Image (spheres, rainbow, N blue to C red):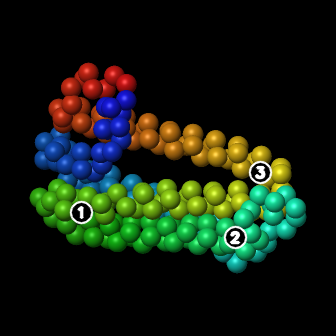
């Protein structure tokens, strides 16, 4: 479990840097980064089209009002989730655009320094996208709860299980990817990859 957590916390961008100039050329590394950011930007833009901030989700009915602290609180959940989903997806789209544009101008021999110099920035599009997607999903589920009451609550439990499963798949995939990168760089021994 310790090895899993250690691998999960690593950045695939940063873990790949020692391979530059040895088993990985700068053009291939640049292409991989750009492909990752392009995917995040395109899907983030798609989420922007699916978020509807102007939709009214007014809490009515005994069921919702009985489980909420107040009607005002209940009425603010949709605007909050939707606006946060919009904000985080806008951040993801803008950051991917900036990074894709700038990485194209970085000289091959300085690409490693460029990535190492901004470790948070190269990961931020993915983090923003994941948070934005979770906000979108939360908003969608909330709209279902408002529209369908108790049935919508049961649906929200199923949606929560799906979201947790997807986050688990992401964590396992990222950890496995990072472990393989670290193995290729001789940064970990094989005994570290058993769990």
Position of residue 167 relative to residue 78, above or below, is above
Tag 3 and tag 2, C-beta contact below 8 Å? no
- Find disc 1 in the rendering and name its residue: 118
Tag 1 and tag 2, C-beta contact below 8 Å? no
Q: Quadrant of residue 146?
A: bottom right
- Find disc 3 in the rendering and name its residue: 153
In the picture, the quarter occupied by the N terminus is top left
Residue 166 screen position, x and y as percent: 55, 43
Q: Say which mark, if any, is on residue 100.
A: none
Residue 39 appears left or right of 160? left
Front of the two marks 1 and 3: 3
Residue 5 screen position, x and y as percent: 35, 37
Separation of residues labelled 1 and 3 (CA atoms): 42 Å
Residue 86 screen position, x and y as percent: 56, 70
Residue placed most toward the observer, 148 or 23: 148
Separation of residues labelled 1 and 2 (CA atoms): 39 Å
In the picture, the quarter occupied by the C terminus is top left
In this figure, what is the number of numbered marks?
3
Q: Earlier in the sequence, mark 1 or mark 2?
A: 2
Label 3 residue SS: helix
- Find disc 2 in the rendering and name its residue: 73
Front of the two marks 1 and 2: 2
Front of the two marks 3 and 2: 2
> Residue at coordinates 50% horizontally, 39% vertically from top-left?
168
Tag 1 and tag 3, C-beta contact below 8 Å? no
Q: Quadrant of residue 62?
A: bottom right
Residue 12 appears in the figure: no
Label 2 residue SS: helix
Q: Earlier in the sequence, mark 1 or mark 3?
A: 1
């Amino acid at each position: 479990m310790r090895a899993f957590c250690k691998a999960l916390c690593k950045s695939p961008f940063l873990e790949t840097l020692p391979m530059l100039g040895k088993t990985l050329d700068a053009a291939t590394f640049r292409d991989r980064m750009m492909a990752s950011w392009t995917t995040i930007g395109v899907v983030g833009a798609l989420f922007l089209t699916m978020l509807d901030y102007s939709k009214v989700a007014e809490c009515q009915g005994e069921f919702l009002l009985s489980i909420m602290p107040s009607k005002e609180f209940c009425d603010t959940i949709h605007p909050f989730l939707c606006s946060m989903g919009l904000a985080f997806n806008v951040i993801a789209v803008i950051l991917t655009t900036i990074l894709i544009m700038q990485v194209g101008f970085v000289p091959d021999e300085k690409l490693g320094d460029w990535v190492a110099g901004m470790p948070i920035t190269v990961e931020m599009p993915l983090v923003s996208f994941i948070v934005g997607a979770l906000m979108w999903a939360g908003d969608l589920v909330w709209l279902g709860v408002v529209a369908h009451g108790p049935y919508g609550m049961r649906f929200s439990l199923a949606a929560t299980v799906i979201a947790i499963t997807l986050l688990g798949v992401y964590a396992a995939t990222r950890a496995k990817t990072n472990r393989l990168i670290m193995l290729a760089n001789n940064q970990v021994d094989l005994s570290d990859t058993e769990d």
